[in-house]
Amino acid sequence: MKKSIHYMNLFLGCLLIAVSLIFILLPNGIITFGFAGVSSLIYFNIGMNPAISLFIINVIMLLFCSFFLKKETLKHYLAPSLLIPILMYGVEYLTKYYSIYLPEMMLVVIVGSALSGYGYSLIYKEGFSAGTVFMLEELIGKWAKFHSKIYTWIIDIFLLIFIIFFLGYQTMLYSLLVIIITKYMITKARFGINDSKMFLVITSKENEVKHYIMHDLKYELTVLDVKGGFTKKKNKILLSVISTSDYYKLKEGIKLIDNKAFIAITDTYDVVNRNF
């Protein structure tokens, strides 16, 4: 049963991406990110079917990266990379009988990017990876020994430059919005939603701050002994992971207790054994 749900979510995610591209974005002249965007640009300039061009690009990328990446990595990309263009090709036939009309371009941007983003989210939540452009990102990261999301953004920047020349600046701006929203949703799916914050606090009023965190806000904390790298002065850091909803309570509460306290706050995407 779990396996069937697993593959149903994969199929649904790929279908949502296909519907977004064929029914929403392409009819309104908007281009998305990565190689799906490249295939759309090819379609608008020479008329080649975007499903076919994306399928060819994905197959070439899979074959090329197979020489450098592990089979386990390629397995994650294989099904979505082939299924998305196949579903695009199938969905295209439905446009002869059905169409989706959205009166405003901003509505097109929101609906198109939301469908694509949610589709990608479903794929990543089931343990797959979508978009061979991210596979290229992994390959470049392996060669450069530095993994970064900037590699895919470089491709998107070139894509946006081509859009300005061939389709105009308005299309570029709408496409940029779609790319930002969709990739934001993908990032959240890949790395989690930051529903917690981690506080690192150095204060001269340690006992008062500890009491406020533990007794008023009801959070656990850890005390770390540290030494300044320059001053060599010994200090204690209070470390606590709290819910994002209590972010301002803790921040402003500490400032009221000690307005000279050092506070560093970072996003925390997952917390395991919170009360350890």
Image (cartoon, helix red, strand yellow):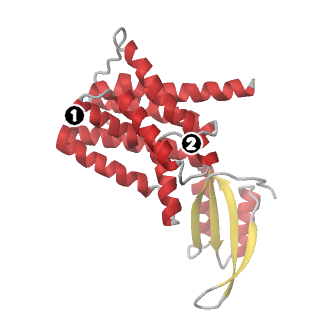
- In the image, 161 versus 240, the foreground residue is 161
Residue at mark 1 to residue at mark 2: CA–CA distance: 33 Å
Q: Residue furthest top?
A: 97
Q: Residue 270: x percent and y percent? A: 67, 51
How many badges with numbers are in the image?
A: 2
Q: Residue 136: x percent and y percent? A: 47, 51
Q: Which mark is residue 45?
A: 1
**Residue 1 as seen in the image, left or right of residue 94:** right
User: Which residue does the image show at 36% across and 8% down from the upper left?
Assistant: 97
Q: Which mark is residue 189?
A: 2
User: Which residue does the image show at 45% across and 33% down from the upper left?
Assistant: 116
Instruction: Decide: few, some or many residues near mark 1? Use Cα within 10 Å; few <14, some 14-19, many ≥20.
Output: few
User: Which residue does the image show at 25% across and 42% down from the upper left?
Assistant: 172
Which numbered disc, 1 or 2, marks the residue that appears first in the sequence? 1
For residue 19, which quarter of the picture?
top left
**Residue 164 as seen in the image, left or right of residue 175:** left
**Residue 125 vertical placement versus 275 (above, below):** above
Placement of the C terminus among the 4 image quadrants: bottom right
Q: Amino acid at mark 2?
A: Ala
